[in-house]
Image (cartoon, helix red, strand yellow):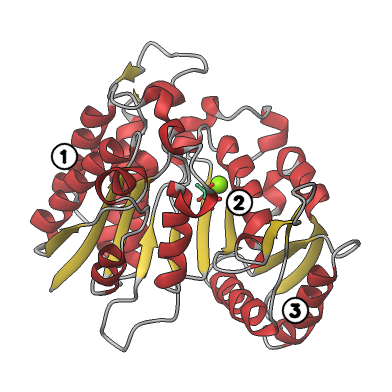
Amino acid sequence: MNYRIGIVRGDGIGPEVVGAALGVLEAVGARFGHAFAKEELLAGGCAIDASGEPLPEETVARAKACDAVLLGAVGGPKWDTLPSHLRPEKALLGLRSALRVYANLRPAVLLAPLREACPLKDEIVGSGFDILIVRELTGGIYFGKSGRTEDGQAAFDTEFYTRKEIERILRVGYEAARKRRLRLCLVDKANILESSRLWREVNARISAEYPDVETSAMYVDNCAMQLVRAPGQFDVIVTSNMFGDILSDEASMLTGSIGMLPSASIGEPGAPGKPTMGLYEPIHGSAPDIAGKDIANPLGTILSVAMMLRYSFNLNKEAEAVEQAVARVLEAGWRTADIALHKVESTTRIVGTKEMGRLVAKEVQRSRI
Ligand code: IPM
Ligand code: MG
């Protein structure tokens, strides 16, 4: 089958990590006989430079016509002083919203070869962890009313959620839990926030439809603590846009580096046999300080490609081939600088962004799946 993929290389290290990931995608195409057509899309700071806006209308229209979109990262100091509607981050929010990808899946898994890069002690990590953070992505405080008072002496942002938004993200969480270890933890601040109390109310009803899934609820401050105290206790975490943003950065560090974490943002499933629109991006940002040096870790983006194959195209074998290729490259001792910081073994070999991409692509080509 032919797939059409929108490519937003973006700013900072975005173009580098996307370049490496596209090499892996090409290897998937060659190994498994698929054609992936690429549609280059401008968004973020580079779009501001080229057209004056972070998310040109043309980008949105062309992205919508694709089967899925792969995004590197947007933003950088060059555009930080622009007014809020012109900031590169607006492109990201605008794209998520326009593509209606309300469910952001962020898996944090400790891969065995990266045990040394995890900052937690052995007795805390135990037999490892495999957490899926399901973050609501197109609502909440990111999209609520915000502004300044007339005299400029105060500012506000609003956490706003409808029952419908809560219900649909919870369902994504429960369905995911059914394919995993059957546990779901709702993370909120229901001791303070009315919106969180609505989440709990809706969850009481939805959880009854999934009696096979064990449900719990936790305040977000406690969750932040529990993630570093006993990460193995979590299976699926479902939470709001803002809390998911924060907790996923925390969880990413447990896997060794923020450079490792992929993400998939999906909406309603496509028609039977058709792709499901999704936006795939590593959870790290544009890291302008290391941009252009060929040292960024492309694995988060490469693993995002694996998620694209699985969630948008239902190509499960191909997704596994990419994930196994990443594991094999790590097992062989190859590391980018960010995951080689802790205890460099004699077998560790540090490589740059491009080389890491080539190594994974080579493993995909050799895959026997
Ligand atoms: C993320 C990022 C974005 C977010 C920023 C860059 C707008 O931190 O994807 O986690 O807050 O969603
Ligand atoms: Mg974030």
Q: Earlier in the sequence, mark 1 or mark 3?
A: 3
Mark 2 and ligand 2: say if the CB distance to the nearest ligand atom is below 8 Å: yes
Q: x and y percent of residue 181 in the render?
A: 61, 65
Up the image or down, 44 lies above or below 113; here it is: below
Res. 100 image quadrant: bottom left
Mark 3 and ligand 1: say if the CB distance to the nearest ligand atom is below 8 Å: no
- Closest to the observer: 300 or 11? 11
Disc number placed over residue 245 in the picture, else none:
2
Q: In the picture provided, is 60 more to the left or to the right than 62?
A: right
Q: Amino acid at mark 2?
A: Asp
- Tell whether label 3 touches label 1 (CB within 8 Å): no
Q: Secondary structure at mark 3?
A: helix
Res. 128 image quadrant: top right
Q: Quadrant of the C terminus?
A: bottom left
Q: In the picture provided, is 41 more to the left or to the right than 208?
A: left
Up the image or down, 209 lies above or below 151; here it is: below
Q: Secondary structure at mark 2?
A: helix
Question: Badge 3 is on which residue?
Answer: 203
Q: Earlier in the sequence, mark 2 or mark 1?
A: 2
Question: Which circle, 2 or 3, is nearer the viewer?
Answer: 2
